[in-house]
Amino acid sequence: RYYIESFLARHAADIYGHVLEVADNTYTRQFGGARVQQSDVLHVSLQHPGATITADLTCADHLQSETFDCVIFTQTLQFIYDVRAALCTLYRILKPGGVLLATGNGISQIARWDMDHWGEYWRFTSLSAHKLFTEIFPASNVTVEAHGNVLAAMAFLHGLVSEELRQDELDYFDPDYEVLITIRAAKPTTEK
């Protein structure tokens, strides 16, 4: 969560207006605060507590286009087999000028509960994330960053928490050990 929360803190100004977040709205509240006018929670299951929108993003024609100023999409990409279809939906439901703030696993263990319930399909690199997102969003509107190093990767795989490492140990970046990939993708203000 250290890298996720650092990413969202750097892009907190993007979290405003009508915001959609997956599973709960913790990050919407934490980083959007008073800038958020309406908060919706997306989940694939009808039974998920707190969900205001139920949808499978790979086939979500029922979701209204150009609805959200921001979509917070953390640690969800790896659980969607048809990632391209989901990204097309996310692009469509963003308002012009809207921003998608996404994260995905690089080096990681399997999330067993999620794997058993709906599958875990992908690990990303900064290169694969860039190629994937620029198939949907204009390349000039996509920023992809990787975070991590060998120590952070080993600590994560051993189940250590970020508080057990120093900040400088977490912040050091080694491009050969991408633990987390962050993506900021903005929909153009006008379609060409």
Image (tube, grey):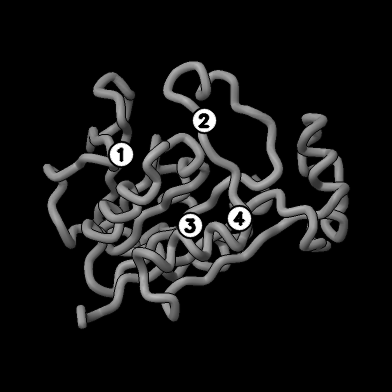
Front disc: 2 or 3: 2
Q: Residue at x 43, y 49 (%)?
A: 73
- Among the 4 quarters of the image, the one containing residue 173: bottom right
Disc 3 secondary structure class: helix
Report which residue position mark 3 lands on.
Answer: 31
Report which residue position mark 4 lands on.
Answer: 181
Report which residue position mark 1 lands on.
Answer: 42
Q: Which mark is residue 120?
A: 2
Left or right: residue 39 versus residue 154 is left
Q: Residue at x 77, y 38 (%)?
A: 156
Q: Residue at x 47, y 54 (%)?
A: 102
CA separation in Å, label 4 and label 1 = 21 Å
User: Mark 4 Cα within 10 Å, few/some/many (few <14, many 20+)?
Assistant: many
CA separation in Å, label 4 and label 2 = 16 Å
CA separation in Å, label 1 and label 3 = 18 Å
Of labels 3 and 4, earlier in sequence is 3
Of labels 2 and 3, earlier in sequence is 3
Disc 1 secondary structure class: strand
Of labels 2 and 1, earlier in sequence is 1
Of labels 1 and 3, earlier in sequence is 3
Disc 4 secondary structure class: strand
Front disc: 4 or 1: 4
* Amino acid type indicated by mark 2: Glu
* Above or below: residue 167 compared with residue 54: below
Left or right: residue 64 versus residue 6 is left
Q: Position of residue 17 (x, y in %)?
A: 28, 63
Q: Position of residue 43 (x, y in %)?
A: 32, 33
User: Mark 2 Cα within 10 Å, few/some/many (few <14, many 20+)?
Assistant: some
